[in-house]
Image: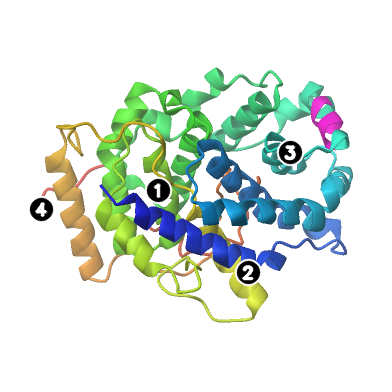
Amino acid sequence: MTDTRLIHNVGAGALEWLWAHRDGFQLEPDVDPEVGFLERFKPIGELAMICKVLFREGVAGSRQAQLARPLLDHAWRETLDGGRMLVRGQLTEPLSPIPFEVYLPFKELGYSQPEIERAARLNHRLESWVAFEATPTRRLGLSAFQRRFGLPPRPPEAELRDTTWLARTPEPWTVEGHIAYDVTHNVFHLTDWGERPDGLPPGTADYLATWLPVWIDDWLDLERWALLGELLVVDACLPRPTLDERAWEGFAAAQQPDGAMPALRTMPQGAPDEVFDIVYHPTLVAPTPPSWPRPGPCPGWPRHHDGPSAYSVARRTARRRRDSGSACQAGGRLSAPVGHGDGRGPGGSARHTDGSGAGSAFPAGGRVPADA
C-alpha cells in the first residue's frame, strides 16, 4: 500500500497549480448560446465536487485546506458572480441539467442561489426531465444528484443500477477509454464519491476488486494520466482500497514541479489558456483520492481474488501489444468527465484531452487469446 504522504503531496501540488491558474476557470459570457455557453461551466462543477470530497472526509492536509476554500470562493464569487451566471445559464437553456449539477456541490458546501433551486424543483416536476435522453451512466448521475438535493429521484436510482455497462460485468478486456470513464463515473454515483462504499452491489464490487488492478496497470503503462487518476479514485471508493504503490509512484512521477498533471505522457505545448484546458482535468483529479477513513486491505485479502491466471494472461497480452507497438496511440479528443459519462454534465466536456477513445491495450472480441 502506498505511503499516504505521497498521495497528499501529489494533492497539495495539484492544488497549488490550480490556485496559481484559477483565472483559467472563466466563463465566456459573450459566446453565442448556440455554440455552447454552458460548456465553460463544467470545469467549475468539477472543482466544486473535488473540494467537497476533500472537505467531507476531513483528510486534506492543512495546505490543501488552505487552498481549497479560497479556490471555491473565487469560483463562486468571481467566476459565477455569486451564482448569477448559473441563473443566466438556466435562462439560456431552461431544461439543461448543467446549472443544477454545477450548483449542487456548492450548495452542499454552504453556498446558495435561490433562483437555481426554484428552477431545479420546477424542472423536476416536468415529464421532459424524465424523458431527457442520456446514457445510462449519465441518467444514474442525474438521479443521484436529485437525491442529494433532497428531491425524489426520477427515475429512481434502483431502476437504473442494472442498466449500465459495469452492472453487467462484461468481458474486462473489452474496456477502452470511453467505457473506462463510464465505469469511473458509475462508481462515483453509486458510492457518492466514496462516502457510501456499500452502495456498490456485491457483484460489482467483486468484479472491480478483480479487474480494476489490471486496468490501472494498463493505463499506467500507456501513461494516460487523466484516466489513471480517475481509476485511482475508483480504487479509493471501494470497500477495500489497495492504494496501489506502483501506480501511485508512477502517477506522482508524472506530476510537474509546479503541480500540473499532464493528461497523456508529457505536458502539452501551446498558449496558456489552451494548456489549461488540456491539463486542468487530470490536475483536478490528483487531489481527490486520499486515504479514506475506512479500513484498508484486510490481511490475507487477495488482490485479484481467484483470478490470478486471467489477470496474468491479460497483463502479458497488454505488455506484448504495447511492446510491439500495437497499443492504441493518442490521436483524437476524448470526453473524459469527472461527474458524468457522456460529456454533458459537469466534467463532461470534450475539452479533456488525454488521447484516443480506444485506449485499452486489452484485446477485443470477448476472450483472452489462448497464446498470450
- Between tags 3 and 1, which lies in front? 1
* Magenta highlight: main SS: helix
Tell me: residue 191, above or below residue 323: above
User: In the image, what residue type sits under mark 4?
Assistant: Asp
Q: Which mark is residue 371?
A: 4
User: What amino acid type should be assigned to the residue bearing mark 1?
Assistant: Leu
Does 147 appear above or below 36? above
Is the residue under label 4 in contact with that under label 1 (CB below 8 Å)? no
Q: Nearer the viewer, mark 2 or mark 1?
A: 2
Q: Which residue corresponds to mark 2?
A: 20
Q: Given this view, does label 4 or label 3 mark the residue nearer the observer?
A: 3
Tell me the distance, in whole angstroms, between the alpha carbons under discs 3 and 2. Answer: 30 Å
Q: Nearer the viewer, residue 115 or 224?
A: 115
Note whether 96 is above or below 197 in the view shown. Answer: below
Please tell me the numbered disc located at residue 97.
3
Lower sequence index among marks 3 and 1:
3
Compute the Cα span from label 3 to label 1.
Answer: 26 Å
The kind of residue on which mark 3 rests is Pro
Task: State yes or no: residue 110 in magenta.
Answer: no
Q: Earlier in the sequence, mark 4 or mark 3?
A: 3
Q: Are marks 4 and 3 in contact (CB under 8 Å)?
A: no
Tell me which numbered mark, 2 or 1, is placed earlier along the sequence: 2
Give the structural element (helix, strand or loop) at label 1. Answer: helix
Q: Is residue 119 magenta?
A: yes
